[in-house]
Image (spheres, rainbow, N blue to C red):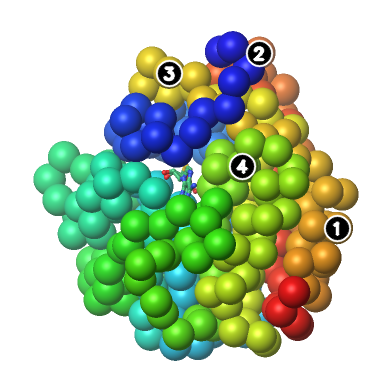
Amino acid sequence: MDGEFTGKEIYQDLFSPRGYLDTYYDPKKGILVTDGFLDFALRKLHEAFTTRGVKGEVLIDIGHGPTIYQDLSACESFKEIIGADYTDRNREYYEGALRNDPGTFDWTGVIKQVCEMEGKGTTVEEKREKLRNTVKRTVKCDVTKSKPLHPLVLPQVDCVMTLGCLECACKDLDTYRDVLKNISTLLKIGGHLIITEILNCTTYYLGGKWFSCLSLSEEFLRNAITEAGYAIIDLEVIPRPYDKDQYRLCDHDSSFFILARKVRDI
Ligand code: SAH
């Protein structure tokens, strides 16, 4: 890794959905599994969509990549989820994962975990169907554009969610602030924003290639999100245990979750 920013064209050409899933979400060795991120994200999302009462008509899941775990709780509280990502390959993979196409990554264990947390006796098959029926489509999106879904125009939605995407998409902290404004244009006043990020990460590896990551701190995020017109409802950071081999592949030291309500346009 030469320290250069990995732009969206490189994501389009070289980001391997399967390489990402195998390195980060493998049930035994995945970096975001062993460091506690996945359990943390599932728990915080479950809380947001139940006890915190986040619900509504439409939620946009920005930068979903090839993963579907993030929509498993949301699909119980929203009538419609719209996926949005920059790369064609990630949108195709996401659609295949929703259909549970043969050969796609196996989320069964994660789906079971969410059904158990919900405690309503939902089966894995029922959850898959609910998810498939709720995620109606995924659309091209570039968060660095002032109109991220251009040329698509949508009425403002009730919830914008973005997990592990903005630290990949932004080359510096000023861009991150701008990107918060860009994605806020999609959200109604009173609607909810959910963000997770890995903190203090500079690079990450997948499928034979290094990608850059913008190093973020809790303090920066707290300030930037507040300045973007939000009231913070819930914010939690969990540390990552040290592991030399895993830190070599991806060097974040903690994970961050925030739930905030949009109080004004800026
Ligand atoms: N949500 C996934 C993260 C996927 S990795 C998870 O929780 O694990 C980061 C994602 O950001 C990739 O899918 C990539 O295509 C997307 N991305 C990168 N730059 C982007 C941009 N400018 N606009 C929208 N998405 C972008």
Q: Label 4's element?
A: loop
- Between circles 4 and 1, the one closer to the viewer is 4
Residue lying at 59% horizontally and 20% vertically, measured from the top left: 4
The residue pinned by badge 1 equals 223
Q: Label 2's element?
A: helix
Nearer the observer, 251 or 138:
138
- Of the numbered discs 4 and 1, the one sitting upstream in the chain is 4
Hey, what amino acid is under mark 3? Answer: Lys
Q: CA distance from mark 1 to mark 2?
A: 32 Å
- Of the numbered discs 3 and 1, the one sitting upstream in the chain is 3
Q: Position of residue 72 (x, y in %)?
A: 42, 65
The residue pinned by badge 2 equals 244
Q: CA distance from mark 3 to mark 4?
A: 18 Å
Residue 136 shows in this picture: yes
The residue pinned by badge 3 equals 209
Q: CA distance from mark 3 to mark 2?
A: 19 Å
The residue at label 3 has a CB less than 8 Å from ligand 1: no
- Between circles 1 and 2, the one closer to the viewer is 1
The residue pinned by badge 4 equals 170
Hey, what amino acid is under mark 4? Answer: Cys
Q: CA distance from mark 4 to mark 2?
A: 27 Å
Q: Is residue 18 above or below residue 132?
A: above
Residue 237 shows in this picture: no
Q: Label 1's element?
A: helix
Q: CA distance from mark 3 to mark 1?
A: 32 Å
